[in-house]
Image (cartoon, rainbow, N blue to C red):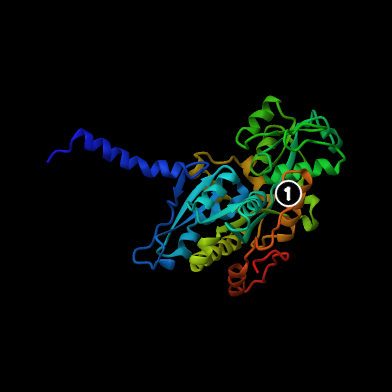
């Protein structure tokens, strides 16, 4: 029996609905399945799950996710459960995806993790592991800004109001004794909230005099003639501070601990491989960036950016607590109750099994 035109229209709408649902999840860009590692035929599913949905940003500071995706290490640990990936441009959209249940596990910066935890009253997510430290710099136009004191009166870009780098810059500005209204960005320094994708264009055009940004944006600005005036790592004890965590939906953690443990095993194995094979890892991260965005990074950007990032399983919990206090002082966050934001039980089991040492939650673990 022939298909009527009306039925064709119905079928077309039904085919589009999953795509509309995906778009509504708040993804920063297209969700992408790993094209380098497929589910092995006959492999056993973990916790009976068809898939685990993993989110990350297209930043080198999310190198654990980039490399683990490209090398198929998450898929290897998940066995017959498919690792599905979604790439985001900003923390709020990833938190939204977690809260809506369209994402299970995510790599994310400390500020959106804190915001997501506090806004839900501590009910929606947990930080379950670390991923990276460092990789954030203040890059300036050397013709306009020759020293740190010259930052006063200038226009400095940060990625987003209240994001991790925005909070760090506002805190540094306050420590210099300068005044800035956090919401408007106006004051002794003008803070320009600018997407990392457009900041290099703004810098090239002269509409900003510098930027406090993560890699690879910082190295892109250097390639445009900028100068690194300050590496944020130098402001922290032992030059370590959390830039990327691993978070999970609490419901998913409670219902599927074996799947979460598998992802953590993959993360630990990925970081171990990255640190043992830095050149190969750098190339793998760049290949995944190209697969996700359609464009690889040139060597003059990739090499210095990668060198400034430390990949670590330690979530550096004490530095997240300090970053939250910085947000409070800037007026961007009410005094948060972070008790219970961490659950490092599974990570420490994985580290112990691998012959490593346990990591600390700075007294902020789930009771």
Give the secondary structure at mark 1.
loop
Quadrant placement of the C terminus: bottom right
Image vertical order of residue 340 relative to residue 31, above or below: below
Residue 352 occupies quadrant: bottom right
Residue, disc 1: 334
| Any part of residue 244 in sight | yes
- Residue 171 lies, in percent from the top left, at 79, 44
Quadrant placement of the N terminus: top left
| Any part of residue 240 in sight | no
Q: Residue at x 76, y 34 (%)?
A: 140
| Most foreground residue, 58 or 193 | 193
Residue 175 occupies quadrant: top right
Image vertical order of residue 266 relative to residue 119, above or below: below
- Residue 347 lies, in percent from the top left, at 60, 67
Q: Residue furthest front?
A: 121
Residue 152 occupies quadrant: top right
Q: Residue at x 59, y 45 (%)?
A: 92
Image vertical order of residue 214 relative to residue 143, above or below: below
Give the number of marks.
1
| Most foreground residue, 293 or 338 | 338
Q: Residue furthest left?
A: 1
Instruction: Indicate left or right for 355 with 288 as reference.
Output: right
- Residue 110 lies, in percent from the top left, at 67, 52
Q: Residue at x 80, y 44 (%)?
A: 172
């Amino acid at each position: 029996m022939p298909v009527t035109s009306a039925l064709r229209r119905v079928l077309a709408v039904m085919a589009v609905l999953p795509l509309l649902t995906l778009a509504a999840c708040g993804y920063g860009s297209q969700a992408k399945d790993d094209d380098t590692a497929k589910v092995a035929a006959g492999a056993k599913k973990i916790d009976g799950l068809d898939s685990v949905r993993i989110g990350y940003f297209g930043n080198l500071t999310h190198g654990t996710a980039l490399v683990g995706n490209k090398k198929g290490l998450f898929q290897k640990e998940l066995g017959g459960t498919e690792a599905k990936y979604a790439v985001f441009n900003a923390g709020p959209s990833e938190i939204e995806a977690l809260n809506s249940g369209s994402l299970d596990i995510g790599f994310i910066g400390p500020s959106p993790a804190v915001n997501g935890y506090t806004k839900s009253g501590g009910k929606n997510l947990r930080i379950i592991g670390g991923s990276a430290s460092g990789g954030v710099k203040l890059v300036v136009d050397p013709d306009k800004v020759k020293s740190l004191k010259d930052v006063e009166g200038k226009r400095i870009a940060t990625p987003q109001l209240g994001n991790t780098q925005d909070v760090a810059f506002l805190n540094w500005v306050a420590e210099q004794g300068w005044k800035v209204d956090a919401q408007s960005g106006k004051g002794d320094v003008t803070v320009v909230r600018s997407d990392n994708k457009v900041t290099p264009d703004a810098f090239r055009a002269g509409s900003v005099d510098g930027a406090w940004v993560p890699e690879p944006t910082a190295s892109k600005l250097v390639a445009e003639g900028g100068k690194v005036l300050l590496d944020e790592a130098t402001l922290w004890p032992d030059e370590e501070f959390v830039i990327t965590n691993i978070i999970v939906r609490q419901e998913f953690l409670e219902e599927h601990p074996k799947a979460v443990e598998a992802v953590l095993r993959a993360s630990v194995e990925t970081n171990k491989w990255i640190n043992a094979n830095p050149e190969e890892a750098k190339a793998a991260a760049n290949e995944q960036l190209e697969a996700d965005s359609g464009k690889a990074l040139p060597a003059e950007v990739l090499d210095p950016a990668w060198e400034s990032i430390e990949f670590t399983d330690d979530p550096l919990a004490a530095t997240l607590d300090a970053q939250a206090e910085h947000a409070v002082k800037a007026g961007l966050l009410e005094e948060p109750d972070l008790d219970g934001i961490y659950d490092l039980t599974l990570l420490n089991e994985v580290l112990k099994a691998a012959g490593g040492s346990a990591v600390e939650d700075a007294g902020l673990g789930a009771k």
